[in-house]
Image (spheres, rainbow, N blue to C red):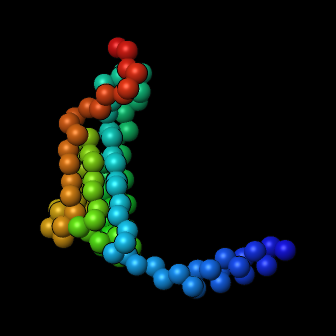
Amino acid sequence: MADRVLGDVDDVASLTAFDPKASAGLFVGVSTFEDTRILGVPYAVDDAVDLAHLFTLELGLIPPERAVLLLAGEPRKSASSERLARLIEKGASARTLGSTISTANSKN
């Protein structure tokens, strides 16, 4: 039964052509929050940048001009900083959300 299902999935995949021009990506990296009960995520910005770079420039799954990065903080790794510059150079949009992000129900 599993072979039949997997075979069906493969058949469907072969019938539908993937077009990267029809794809878009939103990559969000939030390092700090106003609500002090939420711990910071020091490498969240790096992760968002690195994933955007992977999906756009390395794998070619998303055209760079259809990639948007929303970042709260700066990349910590030099490789991520270089990737961010390359993404912007190739047409990706990067927006800085500020140094901290509010949560909807934050109570300090």
Q: Which of 16 and 48 is in front in this view?
A: 16
Residue plotted at (17% across, 63% down): 88
Whole-percent x, y for residue 45 in the image: 31, 48
For residue 85, side relative to residue 103 (left or right): left
Residue plotted at (37% across, 15% down): 107
For the C terminus, give its image quadrant. top left
Count of marks placed on residues: 0
Residue 22 in sight here: yes
Whole-percent x, y for residue 75 in the image: 25, 50
Question: In the orientation shown, which residue stands out farthest toward the top?
Answer: 108
Whole-percent x, y for residue 16 in the image: 53, 81
Q: Nearer the viewer, residue 13 or 99?
A: 13
Residue plotted at (48% across, 83% down): 17
For the N terminus, give its image quadrant. bottom right
> In the figure, 26 relative to 72: above or below?
below
> In the figure, 101 relative to 61: above or below?
above
Q: Which of 108 and 16 is in front in this view?
A: 16
Corner quadrant of residue 12: bottom right
Residue plotted at (31% across, 65% down): 53
Whole-percent x, y for residue 22 in the image: 37, 72
> In the figure, 12 relative to 63: above or below?
below
Corner quadrant of residue 82: bottom left
Residue 79 in sight here: no
